[in-house]
Image (cartoon, rainbow, N blue to C red):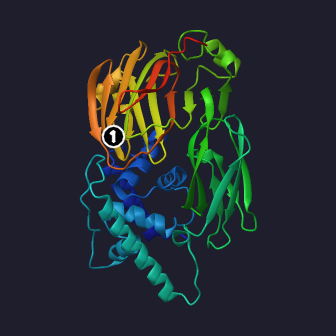
Amino acid sequence: MSHISDNDKNLLEAIKKRIAKASGLSEVSDWVQKDYEFVVFFIEDQTGHRLSLSTVKRIWKNEFERLPHTTTLDILANLAYNKDWHSIKKEHLSPEIQTIPKREMEKKPRKVKSPKLYFLILLAVLLLSVLGTYLLSTISTRSPSKVSEEVSFSYEKTVEGKIPNTVVFRYDIEGVDANRFFLQQSWDSSRKVEIFKGTNERTDIYYIPGYFMAKLFADEEIIKELPIHVTYEDWFMAARQPMEKIYTFSPNLWSKEDYLGIDKRKLAQKGIDLNKKLQLAFYYVIDFGLDGDDFEQTTHFKMEPLEAIDCPIFNLHVQGVDGYYWIMFGNKGCESELEMRLGDVIHNGKNEDLSMFGTSVYEWQKVDVLTKDKEVTLKLNGTPIFSSAYHQSIGPIMEISYFFNGIGMIDNVQLKNINGETIFADDFTKR
């Protein structure tokens, strides 16, 4: 990493603006959490490389005193202009070149049409980088981008099928050249902690179940990822307010109705302020023994109005070993706020018409997800509303979960395999 000059700052700003424009987002001053999350998805969709949410936030908010890692700069530069950072910098500084050559980019997220081509290009860039470093160095220094296969990273849970669950992480970062190291237990950047050379263990607690991807960072670069399956043999209910603070609810606090939900009084009893934004979530986390590329899922959902929530939104999440579905439905008129990810394909209501996902969320709605060989059809109340396909398998299903940005409830949840056989079902009548 190096201190940032005015030229570097201006060049990085040009790259950021071009990526933001290509993704269909507004000025960064108007961005909220989900916009930063979408940029993470957009970068991964276009390049095959995933930057952490904290890295994207830091770069777009200009919250850095030094340049990001060269690997990160190359990812952004290649996305914006189809050239690596140093090539663009050289052109940018050359007197003969008045502007940076532009790369034609689609105005909305697209499918990755040739994963093999992306892989070969990225592999070539990586090999050239390794060779250049070797020729220019008299001492072999192993940077983060070259040691991911050599870094050891493992874990052990202290209990099975229970929450909270302490996990013991073990790692070896002694051979990595970086200024600082971090461990992050999941997607939640607020759970990112610093680790140091000379240590090889760190413990952390999971307060909710799920299929998580723990990450080891060297500076801003992810050098190793590790799947963590924190299972729970029943439904699990939790809320966040703010997102960094988790509240959990035992079954005795759940609504005594033939659906899964919780009433306002019980939320307030746990300290939830109904005059502020919140997230309510229901999880069922086991190995379902079900192929995520060939299955059927049915869910009924409904929400309750809250004064603090202008656009009530319901999120359906199916997590596989290698990918996931994230499907959003909102109240009519709120469609611009919706996003969706099906495997490696992303759709965003800011630059794509997702009006078919707007519905009367204060009334019971039925959602069907029908997937056959990575071809997805979505139905709302029995009517097909959307079809799409993806390329990269999401693998076996390890978690289903539902999220509301307010008070919500679900009923009649079913999972079936491709032969129509019921693998999981719950109508919540026996509670």
Instruction: Categorize mark 1 by other alpha carbons within 10 Å: few (<14), some (14-19), many (20+).
Output: many
Identify the residue shown where x is 27% and y is 75%: 97
Q: Which quadrant of the rendered structure holds the C terminus?
A: top right
Left of 360 or right of it: where is 194? right
Q: Nearer the viewer, residue 408 or 38?
A: 408
The type of residue carrying mark 1 is: His
Q: Where residue 386 sits in the image (x, y, percent)? A: 27, 31
Residue 305 position (above or below residue 229): above
- Which residue sits furthest top? 257
Residue 66 shows in this picture: yes
- Which residue sits furthest bottom? 138
Q: Which quadrant of the rendered structure holds the N terminus?
A: bottom right
Q: Where residue 368 sits in the image (x, y, percent)? A: 36, 25
Q: Where residue 369 sits in the image (x, y, percent)? A: 36, 29
> What is the secondary structure assignment of the residue under circle 1?
strand
Q: Where residue 346 sits in the image (x, y, percent)? A: 35, 43
Q: Quadrant of residue 188?
A: top right
Identify the residue shown where x is 40% and y is 61%: 76
Q: Which of 264 and 252 is in front in this view?
A: 252
Residue 352 shows in this picture: no
Mark 1 lies on residue: 347
Q: Nearer the viewer, residue 54 or 408?
A: 408
Number of marks in picture: 1
Identify the residue shown where x is 49% and y is 15%: 305
Residue 192 position (above or below residue 415): below
